[in-house]
Amino acid sequence: MNIVRFKDETLTAELETEGKVVFPLLNADEIQELKKSFEELHAELPEGFYATTHAKDKAWRKQVSDEIIKTIQKRAEPLFENIHLLGGAFISKAPGEKGILPLHQDWNIVDEKEARSYNLWIPLVDVNEHNGAMRILERSHQKQETYRGPNLPPVLYPISEEVDQHMISLNMKAGEALLYDHALWHSSPMNQSELLRLAIVFGTIPQGAP
């Protein structure tokens, strides 16, 4: 199986078994620089759940991605044996119910019988149950082989309220990174704070994975 591998073998084992791993990544100056970049790109704060990948302007999306990659690449790549970072984006969750992200898995981008793909998710503010931290169903990346995409309803969605009882919140500090398998079931609740919950995210694959 072609998986992303850390230079620290214990982290690789955790990623493979648990479907996720949390580790420190950005320092305070880098966090502030990224937050400043987001503010310069957005004259008005976005409503609900928002990602720069939703923008229609492809050139603008690439510009945003390139700016994020410049910061993340130099910090992340030395920690790994074989990571390949795909496009990066800012994602935000405004206060209120429009920011709720329901239970789901991310789309397939590799043949999961041969390789695994991941998201690298980095909050730029501290996150917890109050402002919409990531919630996961532990080890759920191992439970199903599924095809996932924009027109395919998540198979657990009809029982999402029951599943939610078994999920855990990943409370994280600003600048910590969560690398999680695209097949891991996850969600994020309403942001009940008064501030925007801001993060960045990358799709990632092992080098050489089609």
Image (tube, rainbow, N blue to C red):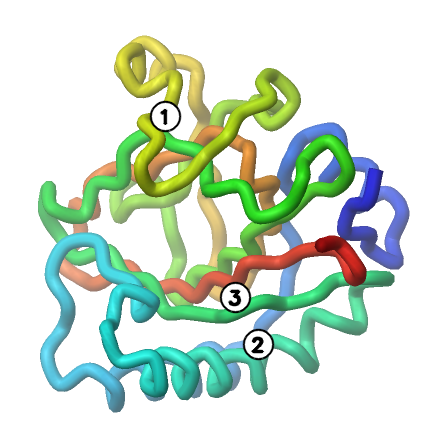
Residue at (58%, 18%) from the top-left corner? Answer: 144
- Badge 2 amino acid: Asn
Image location of residue 134, percent across then percent down = 41, 41
Residue at (53%, 25%) from the top-left corner? Answer: 146
Pointer 2: residues within 10 angstroms few (<14), some, or many (20+)?
few
Q: Which residue is mark 3?
A: 175
Residue 154 - label: 1
- Badge 1 amino acid: Pro
Upstream in sequence: badge 2 or badge 1: 2
Secondary structure of the residue carrying tag 1 is loop
Foreground of the two, 147 or 69: 147
Image location of residue 8, percent across then percent down = 87, 53
Image location of residue 67, percent across then percent down = 47, 87
Foreground of the two, 206 or 36: 206
Upstream in sequence: badge 3 or badge 1: 1
Q: Are marks 3 and 2 in contact (CB under 8 Å)?
A: yes
